[in-house]
Image (tube, rainbow, N blue to C red):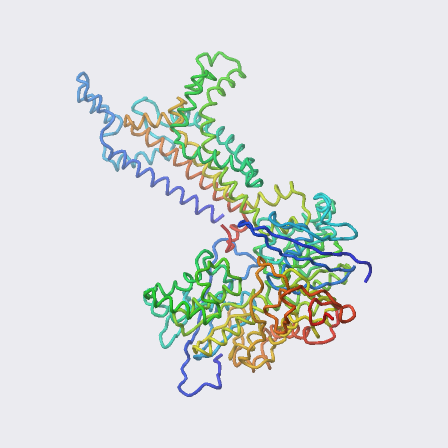
Amino acid sequence: MQSDFSGREFGDNPLLRVQGLAKRYVRGGLLPRYAPVEAVRGVDVELLPARTLALVGASGSGKSTVARCVTRLERPDSGQIWFEGTDIARLSSRELLPFRPRIQMIFQDAATAMNPRFSAAEVIAEPLLIQGCSRPVRLEILQALMRDVALPSEWLNHPVMEFSGGQRQRLAIARALAVRPKLLVLDEALSGLDLSTQAQIANLLLHLQATYSLTFLLISHDLALVAQMADAVAVMAAGQIVEQGQTRQILASPTHEETKRLLASAKTAELNLTSSTVACV
Amino acid sequence: MGETLLIIQGLKVTYSSAGGHAVRALDGIGLEIGDGEVLGILGESGSGKSTLACALLRLLPPNARCDGGEIRFRGRNLLELPEADLRRIRGRELSLVPQDPALSLNPVMTVGSQIAEVLRSHAPCGTAERCQRVRELLAQVGFDSPEEIQRAYPHQLSGGQRQRVVIAQAVACRPALIIADEPTSKLDPAVRADIGKLLSEIRRQYRTAILLISHDPALLAGYADRVAVMYAGRIVESGDCAETLARPLHPYTQGLVAIARSMSLNAAARARFSVIEGDSPDPAVVVAGCRFEPRCSERMEICACQFPPEVAPENARSVSCFKYAE
Amino acid sequence: MNYLARRLARAIVLLIAVSALCFLFTEMAPGSFFDEMRLNPQISPETIALLRSRYGLDQPLIVRYGRWLKSAAHADFGYSVAYNLEVGPLLRSRAANTLLLTSSAMLLAWMISVPVGVWAAARRGHMLDSASTVISSLLIAIPEVVLAVALLAIVVRWRLFPIGGMKSVEFEGLPFWSRALDLARHMLLPMIVLALLDSAIIVRHIRASVLEVLAAPFVQATRGFGIAPARMLFRHLLPAAANPAISLFGFSLAGLVSGSLIVEVICGWPGLGPLILEATLSHDFYLVIGGIMISTLFITGGNLIADVLLVALDPRIRSGAPDAL
């Protein structure tokens, strides 16, 4: 089902276009009865530049797999991934090299996404080292990046161990920004964080998006977050997109069962909070 | 609501790290839970809520010390009980539902046998009877085919299913109090409501009291009778849950509730979320005054010098903030 | 079942490949059994040629290999030139001696290591833990030869028990229990050396895996339900810590036949070790091949058993879970 993005200006080409993406994970031995196997079966999405597309769905719906295919951490079994006009789905590692800086990913658990003994500077500078920047240029860039993510630049030499969860997520964002990406894939980047940290990081991301015209592919199961951060949303279930379109529209009048289900639980939580007299069970 | 089940007074817990510095995780906690009541603890990481959960069952790691206060459970001070007596209470009268269901179950034992182990320790009976009881428990926590689940291993279940299994372990011996440490934070939002409903159901059926710890005001709003807000090892506000969340008194609570409300499905696109400025406090640093002061938009001079005394500006509500101290 | 069949097939292919390589290397090695005989002027070249053709050593390599494979399928492994006996029975009797020694040593090693390893992990930082770490490090660092000779010297010095050989001279005339005692006394030294060396490694692995399990969150959760400590240890902790131990057990099995060569030679135990050593030095072709094949058989068998045990005992590996070891 093709999406219709009203608000698309004439000549506004999508930054990312996924067509017929499919990926299957083969398990050896006895197939377990209960474990969900993430597979993607024929996914079509489009992402306009400087916009945010959210992929929502329950665990096991395939959203993380789509994210990993888009960043080419995995190789899709079939389909095309058009990024700025080139199909990167089948490229070899060597051919992918020029694309790597342009597509970056932020993971869910920042604590495990970076070496705790590295200093903040080493973590953020890693991608710069690969690009071969000279030392003084690097230092300047590092300080600018720390300012971008609202961390004091004096902390550049502190080991990652000393940073809190939210601060580490900021470091991960700084690391991703170091190579000036066009597309940032946020794979449940805000899940597992405290409420106040979520709010801070979400605001930071929105600010950075405005400043650097970043495009976001937001993977999340939190609809409230999606409602505010995403322009368009695609709902996934069992490896397929069951509904997609403008966020406002989908949330106001969902058509598919899965969307209604996700919306219902999000609404219940909100209702609990906003009603002034709660009927306690 | 019956008699008071648990009274904590002035509880202090300190961790000593390898470097030699002591970190005060709990700095004088006091709270009460009555029979069959659900008390919510609203707090974020670093507030000491998990330390509180572990301290109640005396499950703290060896480098932690309880250096003050008492925990009176059904009249007995848990901090002074010998280990053997404590073991009899754990699982039987007081249970813990730990935070991450993926890590709380033994990976090489079937789910059924893990529930059976709890029964075995406290309610000895024949094997067949035990098996039956396990199946009953699995049905009670919402599994449609208990026989199949009984034989499954943890890695074969989803996150929500694992959490149900842990809850089954916790209620196996009909304890008087269940401590639920962030029971839903690692789960999908869709599954969260189910677990919340399950806990309510258990409370209703068995008249079990629940200490519900969470950083999510929405969860507490739905299921807690009263709430106590924790910040940096202390309780800064407590009172009736609906009242506290509808009209919070302490600036920290106000901030949290504002954030939760700003994450609304009806908010405008690209609208900024409400935030509490600054970072959570470093527990290793000792300050004389209110620990929220650096981040407080309403701070006064006195806030940095002394810790605000607890006052009760309204009926059945208390807050530790100089705004109300007069 | 599928898994087992595949592993068995691979094991058989491995055995055949090893036998082929053996033939190749033994052939490539300089010299032959008859070199000494050639130097003896009393033996004519014709006699030597006759002997060679009798043992089939004048045939090309491929033919010899083909014949050997065919007869090996019938459990006939050729003839030993030096002993003038069939290889099969010769190996069997010596292998039995070796197995007696190594299985007793393995039993002793595991009986010591498991309790020590578990206790060291449970009482981490305690004196026992530090002591076991230091001692095991020493034992791993000391070469087998040195340890064997050192203990041998002590035993000889203080005449603790008989050394060398397996049985005393008057063995046959003794009643049953005396015979068993005699055997045991002869076996004591090599058994202790082997057991000490194996224990050092096993203790460290067991300690490490128990420590890892003790730090797992589910341990705290289970303690929270009031399970008694003894039951916690045996029913909950040890099964979760078993994987590395099972692999090690497989390696122990694998090394039953091939791991004791040096100790047997030094202590004079009449096992497979001295036999293969002798055979190699004197180019006793088929005996060498036979000896290597029996070692390989045990190695592949031991590894196979370890793999099967892992699949059978760890539910995560059985169902291909993503976080299994």
Q: Quadrant of residue A80?
A: bottom left
Residue C163 place in picture, x, y as percent:
43, 18
For the residue pair C32 and B277, the one nearer the viewer reads as B277
For the residue pair A92 and B290, the one nearer the viewer reads as B290
Viewed as shown, does residue B207 lie left or right of B65? right
Q: Quadrant of the N terminus of chain B?
A: bottom right
Q: How many marks?
A: 0
Viewed as shown, does residue C235 lie left or right of C287? right
Viewed as shown, does residue C111 lie left or right of A76? right
Q: Quadrant of the C terminus of chain B?
A: bottom right
**Who's the residue at 37% across and 42% down the image?**
C14
For the residue pair B207 and B318, the one nearer the viewer reads as B318
Q: Is any atom of residue A244 visible in this view?
A: yes
Viewed as shown, does residue C42 lie left or right of C169? left
Residue B190 place in picture, x, y as percent:
62, 68
* Residue at the right extreme of this rendering: B2
| Depicted C144 relative to depicted A271: above or below | above
| Depicted B201 relative to depicted C162: above or below | below
For the residue pair A168 and C45, the one nearer the viewer reads as A168
Q: Is any atom of residue A281 visible in this view?
A: no
Residue C314 place in picture, x, y as percent:
54, 47
Residue C275 place in picture, x, y as percent:
35, 25
